[in-house]
Amino acid sequence: MSLFGEFMGTLFGSSTKYSSNQKSLSRQMLYKLVSENSITSLTKDEAILVRDVIDRARRGDAYISILQIDEELSYLKNNGKISYNDYQSLMKIFSEYFSK
């Protein structure tokens, strides 16, 4: 990685630690993973927003990568739609799912 890339990764966060390999993620599993019950600080509206964004990113074929999820959640975090702590909690949940 270039020095500029390292600087940008440090400044804005790097998603290179996540794989671009896609895995099946059913809508039912998505709803189970992203709920206000699984992350208590996540409001119902935030959970719906996260599910909708990730569901759209799946593009109908039910396959998505952890890298794509990170990009979608980072966008929500950077635009104040979810908190940094919710982002971290969601990434932990999805990382565990994708490591299975």
Image (cartoon, helix red, strand yellow):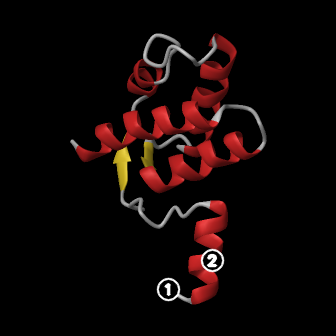
Q: Position of residue 21 (x, y in %)?
A: 36, 60
Amino acid on which disc 2 is placed: Phe
Disc number for residue 7? 2
The extreme left residue here reads: 100
Residue appearing at x 77%, y 36% in the figure: 80
Residue appearing at x 78%, y 42% in the figure: 79
Q: Position of residue 25 (x, y in %)?
A: 39, 36
Residue appearing at x 30%, y 39% in the figure: 96
Quadrant assignment, res 77: top right
- Give the secondary structure at mark 2: helix
Whether 45 is drawn above or below 72: the answer is above
Q: Which residue is mark 1?
A: 1
Determine crowd level at label 2: few under 14, some 14-19, many 20+ residues with C-alpha closer than 10 A: few
User: Closer to the camera, 89 or 28?
Assistant: 89
Whether 53 is drawn above or below 14: the answer is above
Disc number for residue 94? none
Amino acid on which disc 1 is placed: Met
* Residue 24 visible to an observer of this rendering: yes
Q: Is residue 70 left or right of residue 33?
A: right
Q: Position of residue 58 (x, y in %)?
A: 53, 43
- Give the secondary structure at mark 1: loop
Quadrant assignment, res 46: top right
Q: Is residue 43 left or right of residue 25?
A: right
* Residue 25 visible to an observer of this rendering: no
Label 1 and label 2: CA atoms lie apart by 10 Å
